[in-house]
Amino acid sequence: MINIRGRDGGTTVAEQVTESGAAAADEEAFDPAEHARSMVGYHYRTEDYYEVGREKIREYARAVQDFHPAHWDGDAAAALGHSALVAPLTFMSLVGTLAQKKLLESIAEGYDLSQILQTDQVLVFQKPILAGDQLTCDVSLDSFKTVMGRDMMVTKNVVSNQKNELVQTTYTTLLVGRSGEVDPAIADAARNLVMFGASMDAAVANASEHDKLSTPQEHEPLIVEEYRGQPTPKFDEVNVGDELPTRTVRLTRGDLVNYAGVAGDANPIHWNEGFAKLIDLEDVLAHGMLTMGVGGGFISEWLGDPGAVKDYTVRFTTPIPVGSHKPAEIVFSGKIKSKDEESRTAVVSIGATFEGKRIFGHRATATVQLA
């Protein structure tokens, strides 16, 4: 079940939409931006949890080419103080996407949800996700604004586990297109390519009564505990300006298809060359979250313990075309940007380039705990 409430815990979105329906009918034109702006602060909480499977962790780690032993071997995870396999840094994208879609179904009235461009992703880690965790998402529209004629939404997802502990908070920035801005022939082509049930239209058409909006329920405040990992680099031996060893990763069409299946990303621009060319792309494009996931593995490998990453932020700037016969090579680099004596943490500036072009903006950073 999915519950929804406003910032004041008062009337539900369903009630407010009903009350405003008569007034809206009198208006000459519906303004999607005004509607979305009025939804800032409302949120869904998924009542059915997502159970993290051991093999799903390995499957996702393989998809993002993250071969840190803690994702694959129980003994290796235990040696770092973890009770089970540790999920890669971007694993929550699997779960968060599902909750985010539910939110957008209600707040994005008047928008074409097949035309969404993700520009920024912020992950704040309270504690690592482990195999066996039962995760619940509370997702909200955090902000809305119009930038250079494009509507921009920021969604916030608060993730907790079966112990009611805060696990992770994520912020996703999306550029969304309004209905009617997309050629209907292109929209039809996309629907005919994706797996049945993977599109937003299918999700809405097949929604059960349990998916409808319901009255809010109060939930216990989340438990916030301080978590410290077991990183390898020592605080006193790391200096501002130090560079991390570079890593080169090759992405093939097969990698894109595999990630699309593992992550549940049905967008055909990532795997169908004909559709990509239909919308004037030179080739299929690598998923932004795939490149961020690979970058997470780059950080974890140097740090020694994925659980010692405190936050990870990326701005996606340059798309990566992947040809049918030539893999795309991404070069990851890192430099210590700053240190904090009190928390014994460091901020690492992350570089990622494809054919000499930056694919991450200057805001790509990770805050890490040091020994």
Image: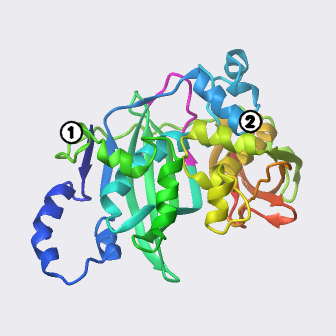
Q: Is residue 56 visible?
A: yes
The colour style of the image is rainbow
Taking the image as drawn, is residue 369 in sight?
Answer: no
**What is the magenta segment's predominant secondary structure?**
loop
In terms of image quadrants, where is residue 336? bottom right
Q: Nearer the viewer, residue 271 or 278?
A: 278
Question: What residue lies at 48% left-to-right and 70% top-to-bottom?
Answer: 182
Helix, strand or loop at mark 2:
loop
Instruction: Please identify the residue farthest to the top as the structure is shown.
Output: 75
Which residue is at a point 77% across and 53% down the rendered structure image?
322
The residue depicted at 75 percent of the width and 25 percent of the height is 69
Foreground residue, 121 or 24? 24
Coordinates of residue 273 in the picture (x, y in percent) = 69, 54
- Tag 2: amino acid: Asp
- Separation of marks 1 and 2 at Cα, in angstroms: 39 Å
Using the rendered view, name the quadrant where residue 2 is placed.
top left
Q: Is residue 24 above or below residue 48?
A: below
Q: Is residue 185 left or right of residue 352?
A: left
Give amino acid for label 1: Glu
Magenta span of residues? 124-134
Mark 2, Cα crowd under 10 Å, few <14 / some 14-19 / many 20+, is: many
Whether residue 21 is situated above or below residue 240 in the rendered picture: below
Instruction: Give residue 13's position: percent from left, percent from top.
Output: 21, 58
Q: Is residue 105 highlighted in magenta?
A: no
Quadrant of image for the N terminus = top left
Left or right of 6 on screen, residue 161:
right
Residue under numbered circle 2: 66
Q: Can you say which quadrant of the picture contains the C terminus? A: top right
